[in-house]
Amino acid sequence: MSFVGFSLGSVISFDLLTCHSESFYVPSSLSRSKAEPNDSAETAELKVQIRNLEAKVAQAKMRAAEEELKLDFLVDTYFMFGSPVGIFMTLRGDIIHSDGAKGLYPKCRQMYK
């Protein structure tokens, strides 16, 4: 089956094919729970535990979003016409890479843009 996206529709279809979701991102509160030099040992340990729990919550949200955005069919070829996907990805800080662990790549055999 082929998938075609035009303009903003290509951004939406790209997000569907990559299972992209804003819930993939770790909440900004992680940066506020970093240990500071004047923290007691107990406070520093609690902040580490908070960061670990927040990371686990972010991973659970990512798994839930992947299940929620899952298509009921396989896409063989994906066509994008007049696509602003590059702009949106730059603004989000994402990269397209064939290795799913290092970046976003649509779950399809071929992609034409």
Image (tube, rainbow, N blue to C red):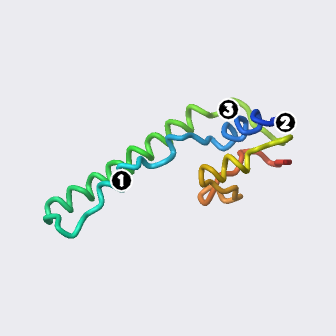
Left or right for 18, reference 26: right
Numbered disc 3: secondary structure: loop
Residue found at x 60% / y 49%: 92
Numbered disc 1: secondary structure: helix
Numbered disc 2: secondary structure: strand
Mark 2–mark 3 Cα distance, whole angstroms, equals 13 Å
Mark 2–mark 1 Cα distance, whole angstroms, equals 40 Å
Q: Position of residue 84 (x, y in %)?
A: 76, 44
Q: Please name whichever residue, 8 or 45, is drawn nearer the observer in this view of the structure.
A: 8
Disc on the earlier residue, 3 or 1:
1
Identified by mark 3, the residue type is Leu
Q: Position of residue 28 (x, y in %)?
A: 40, 49
Disc on the earlier residue, 2 or 3:
2
**Tag 1: Cα neighbours inside 10 Å, few (<14), some, or many (≥20)?**
some
Q: Residue 34, located in which quarter of the rendered image?
A: bottom left
Label number found at residue 96: none
Q: Position of residue 24 (x, y in %)?
A: 51, 45
Left or right for 42, reference 76: left
Label number found at residue 2: 2
Q: Position of residue 30 (x, y in %)?
A: 36, 53
Residue identifier under label 3? 71
Left or right for 69, reference 39: right
Mark 3–mark 1 Cα distance, whole angstroms, equals 32 Å
**Tag 2: Cα neighbours inside 10 Å, few (<14), some, or many (≥20)?**
few
Quadrant the N terminus occupies? top right
Q: Nearer the viewer, mark 3 or mark 1?
A: 1
Residue found at x 61% / y 60%: 102
Residue identifier under label 1? 30
